Image (cartoon, helix red, strand yellow):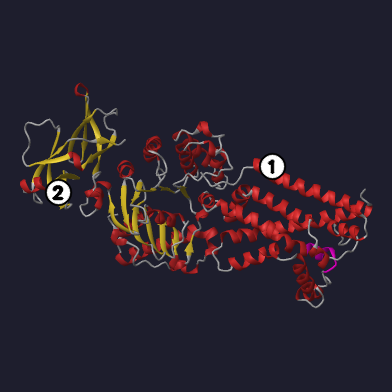
Amino acid sequence: MLTPADLDTLFLTFKVAGIATLLMLLFGTPLAWWLARTRSSWKGIINAVVALPLVLPPTVLGFYLLVLMGPAGAVGKITTWLGLGTLPFTFAGLVVASVLYSLPFVVQPLQTSFAMIGEQPLEAAATLRASPLDTFFSIVVPLAKPGFLTAAILGFAHTVGEFGVVLMVGGNIPDKTRVVSVQIYNHVEALEYSEAHWLAGCLLLFSFSVLLVLYTALKTQPVAHPLK
Amino acid sequence: MEHGSHGLDGLSFIVFACTSKQALNSGDWFFGVQSLLWPFHRHFYQSRSVKSAFYYLKNIMTTILARFQLDYGDFKLNVDLKLPGTGITVLFGHSGSGKTTLLRCIAGLQHAPQGFLAINGSIWQDSEHGLFLPTHKRPLGYVFQEANLFPHLTVRDNLHYGLKRIKQNSGTVKLEHAVELLGIAHLMERMPERLSGGERQRVAIVRALALNPEILLMDEPLASLDSKRKQEILPFLSRLHQQLDIPVLYVTHSQQEVAQLADYLVIMADGRKIASGLPADTLTRLDMPLAQDREAATVWQATVAEHEADYHLTRVTFAGGSLSLPAVDAEVGTPLRVQIYARDVSIALESPTATSILNVLPATITGIADDHSGQSVVQLQVGTQPLLAHITRKSALLLDLQIGMPVYAQIKGTSILN
């Protein structure tokens, strides 16, 4: 059975993933919009930076974040100066790391669905007196709904499943930074296979359900198709 | 147009110097009127002619001034147009002639770095003074080549999308009228994907008209439809034509649509205007490739004068004479457009006494051109109306046709356009 400590780690995991997903949608949406529409020469570089966590070993990303956010790092100096202390081994640090780690899973589906909408509906909206911001909320968001759904689900699920970055940046502090994947590792280290089974099973079920929703529910959603 | 000498060349828009893009929201109409009125004062004081100043003012309030320069490297747009502020102006040209780009510049969908645009007295763009109204602040209606309906909204919600965003309430009246005019009342609850191409385009036209725009811009609204769907919409457009009191700029590459709709015609090629004027005059210009075309035709405005029921004929009068047409179902006094193809017109030196052709009109030759493939295009004038005749080069030589000669034009066929 799941122990109270296991339940705590589950709760903490979903809390980190939930907050990180909200933040990623908040920052990822304008970023994806810009990437989908810009002709700037910066597009390539920004695209590459956003996609970096897809190919980088999580420990590498975690290592750099640890150094950057630590007392001697650039970000660490700023957060200390702001009176926030340093971020590594805190809940906030874990959220920041998760956002950076999972961002491509949010930005890329959004970018694709924004690009698919094309110029035409935006121009039609402009000729019908809608300002660019108005157009974004009344036309782009509804047409990109499948993109938003995919982005949110993938971003959340990917954050739940992270391990390497968490271990580097968050450590293994109960109730603060100890998430499910780390807890499973702890159980296995202690040869508590039965507990490990329960938690691993939970994650397996969760991941499968998420993908099932993604592949079945999304099919019935109106997919953003080019205007007729 | 007759007062073209009061053009914009010498105008000084001093008031504009203090405007910026940010100031447009509240005060654009004010600055627009001010800058157009400034030359009015100038005319008034300098020429001391009330008449001249009055004409300037009258002219500017009923005119579309559009001047754009745009350079994409392989494509350049360079136009300076003065168009009538009412009726349908057709922008005609082949693909790549810049007609759609011009329309997009007028809508503000494309930002020409050098441009000036005034629609019946309000200025929408004046790049010299940093003025550029974004599209959503221009009181226009735009019909795209593809209907461009919002796929996630029903027809009703598509129609109300713009209405919700304008302040005035007169919109709903316009909407009901337009819905009725284009016959789409039964489609209101449908999603756009469940409409036929013709229905979609009709909804798009209503959506644009419902906003009670000050100008209607139409970018080849029929081009994506097959000929059957075209015939479904053309009557609606002709009807619009009679009921709208706003100017319409209509882009097309179809001569048929020109003949049917144009009150004023601008011919574009390579990003420039190559001719403009009344359709009857412009269509018959010998220096235009249109006159050589197999489909070359002229369009006359005529009025139903009399019905000859026994013969199933209708007599119509036009400036300079009358024509007999196959019976037209219209009351006496109804205005008509009559299209006469150049290939249906032949020339006789003397009035033919024994001929089956009913319409033989005295005419004067005003121009002759060869197409270097055995055909001559003869430009004629009947009364005040221009007319084209396609004859063989051999006939032209045998009859020794010369400019200024009085001849008889025999018209074998005509078609009525509305």
Between B307 and B25, the one lying in front of the other is B307
What residue would you read off at disc 1? A216
Q: Magenta part of the protein: which range?
A: A88-96
What residue would you read off at disc 2? B374
Overall secondary structure of the magenta section? helix
The reply, left or right, for residue B47 in relation to residue A161 is: left
Q: Secondary structure at mark 1?
A: helix
What amino acid is found at the position of numbered circle 1 in the picture?
Answer: Thr
At x 14% / y 40%, what residue is drawn?
B346
Q: Residues under labels 1 and 2: Cα distance?
A: 69 Å
Q: Is residue B86 above or below residue A44?
A: above
Q: Is residue A170 above or below residue A148?
A: below
Between B351 and B116, the one lying in front of the other is B351
Tag 1 and tag 2 share a subunit: no
The reply, left or right, for residue A144 in relation to residue B281 is: right
The reply, left or right, for residue B183 in relation to residue A95 is: left
Q: Nearer the viewer, mark 1 or mark 2?
A: 1
Pick the quarter of the image with the C terminus of chain B.
top left
